[in-house]
């Protein structure tokens, strides 16, 4: 009786094991079918262009497959392919763009904003070099944004929507908002219980102020100092933008005053002599006229003779008045 029971248990175990193997195999087969179907869709798009040879299409499909298998959504991959074909992008340039995107994905970075950059570059007919440069810059900003987020998490702060937050911070970094100011923003706003939407709005305002400071002629170092002073003087998240605005107005006002003083003609040149634009007549200064070479000496108290219509120092008479 016991033997029959053990036999039945063994049979049940084997059946369950076989079912598990079947389900796993079916899942892999379904996934393989799905990828093949997706690649066929991409092939159809690439075939619609007369500029891609069979070899280049195969090359691009392999790169696209690598993107999809890495976790890039098929719809995103398809959109890039469609835009590339529409803009007649060279096949090798497209492959380089795919490879740059794949490297970013392998680093575990948030790729949605990078994909947007690629499509934006394609829409503007940007070169491959410019698009890859934009990918690299965005990836670096995403890396820094991740660091800001991790620092806040290590301090025990609870942050909702981490991926969205990284994208918000990366966008502000792209607009040259100082890293330290964004770190202060995230920690202070989270401590005050601000929502992602509220943090996003303040982050966008910081980006606007940073661009405004750049347009006003401030250097990167000056902008960093301006933002640093604002964070040091802000006790709440609501004060920082106003403090930056006030600091910026002071910087612009000071710059205008300095420019105005520096722009006025100096009364003394570098060599110590007066420039022509500031020469005053002896009558105005109270000095005695200096005798010029070639003139007859004049005794003190005497007035040198002048001819009608002739001014001192002139040899040509003025035209007669009508």
Image (spheres, rainbow, N blue to C red):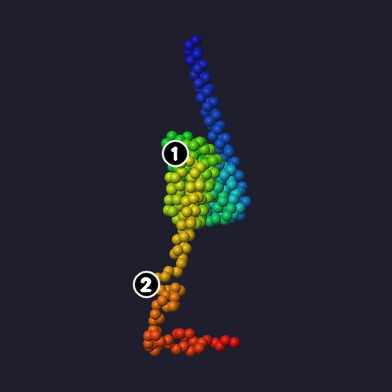
Quadrant where the C terminus sits is bottom right
Is residue 79 left or right of 223 when viewed as pictured? right
Is residue 302 left or right of 193 when viewed as pictured? left
Pointer 1 residue: 152
Instruction: Sort mark 1 into few (<14), some (14-19) or many (20+) by Cα contacts within 10 Å.
Output: some
The residue at 49%/19% (across/down) is 10
The label on residue 38 is none
The residue at 39%/85% (across/down) is 301
Is residue 232 among what the camera can see? yes
| Res 23 → quadrant | top right
Can you give x and y, in whole percent of width and height, for residue 69 in the image? Answer: 52, 41
128 and 91: which is toward the camera: 128
172 and 309: which is toward the camera: 309
Give the mark nearer the N terminus: 1 vs 2: 1
The residue at 55%/53% (across/down) is 121
Pointer 2 residue: 272
Q: Name, please, the residue furthest toward the top.
A: 1
Label 1: which secondary element: helix
Can you give x and y, in whole percent of width and height, for residue 206 in the image? Answer: 50, 47
Label 2: which secondary element: loop
| Residue 238 vertical position relative to residue 17 in the rendered view, above or below | below
The residue at 46%/66% (across/down) is 263
Q: Are marks 1 and 2 in contact (CB under 8 Å)?
A: no
Judged by depth in the image, the label closer to the viewer, 1 or 2, is: 2
């Amino acid at each position: 009786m016991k033997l029959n029971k053990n036999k039945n248990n063994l049979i049940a175990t084997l059946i369950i094991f076989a079912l598990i193997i079947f389900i796993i195999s079916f899942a892999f087969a379904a996934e393989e079918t799905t990828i093949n179907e997706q690649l066929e869709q991409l092939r159809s798009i690439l075939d619609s262009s007369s500029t891609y040879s069979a070899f280049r299409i195969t090359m691009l499909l392999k790169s696209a497959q690598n993107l999809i298998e890495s976790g890039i959504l098929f719809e995103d991959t398809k959109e890039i392919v469609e835009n590339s074909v529409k803009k007649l992008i060279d096949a090798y340039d497209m492959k380089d763009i795919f490879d740059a995107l794949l490297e970013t994905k392998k680093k575990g970075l948030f790729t949605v904003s990078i994909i947007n950059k690629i499509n934006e570059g394609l829409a503007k007919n940007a070169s491959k070099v410019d698009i890859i440069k934009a990918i690299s810059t965005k990836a670096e900003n995403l890396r820094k944004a991740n660091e800001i987020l991790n620092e806040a998490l290590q301090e025990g702060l609870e942050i909702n929507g981490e991926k969205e937050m990284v994208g918000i911070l990366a966008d502000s970094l792209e607009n040259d908002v100082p890293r330290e100011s964004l770190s202060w923003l995230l920690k202070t706003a989270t401590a005050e219980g601000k929502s992602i939407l509220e943090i996003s709005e303040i982050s966008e305002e910081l980006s606007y102020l940073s661009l405004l400071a750049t347009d006003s002629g401030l250097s990167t170092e000056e902008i960093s100092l301006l933002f640093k002073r604002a964070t040091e003087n802000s006790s709440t998240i609501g004060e920082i933008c106003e403090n930056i605005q006030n600091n910026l107005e002071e910087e612009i006002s000071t710059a205008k005053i300095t420019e105005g003083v520096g722009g006025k003609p100096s009364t003394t040149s570098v060599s110590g002599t007066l420039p022509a634009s500031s020469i005053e007549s002896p009558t105005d200064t109270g000095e005695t006229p200096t005798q010029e070479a070639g003139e007859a000496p004049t005794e003190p108290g005497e007035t040198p003779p002048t001819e009608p219509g002739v001014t001192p120092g002139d040899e040509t008479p003025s035209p007669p008045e009508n």
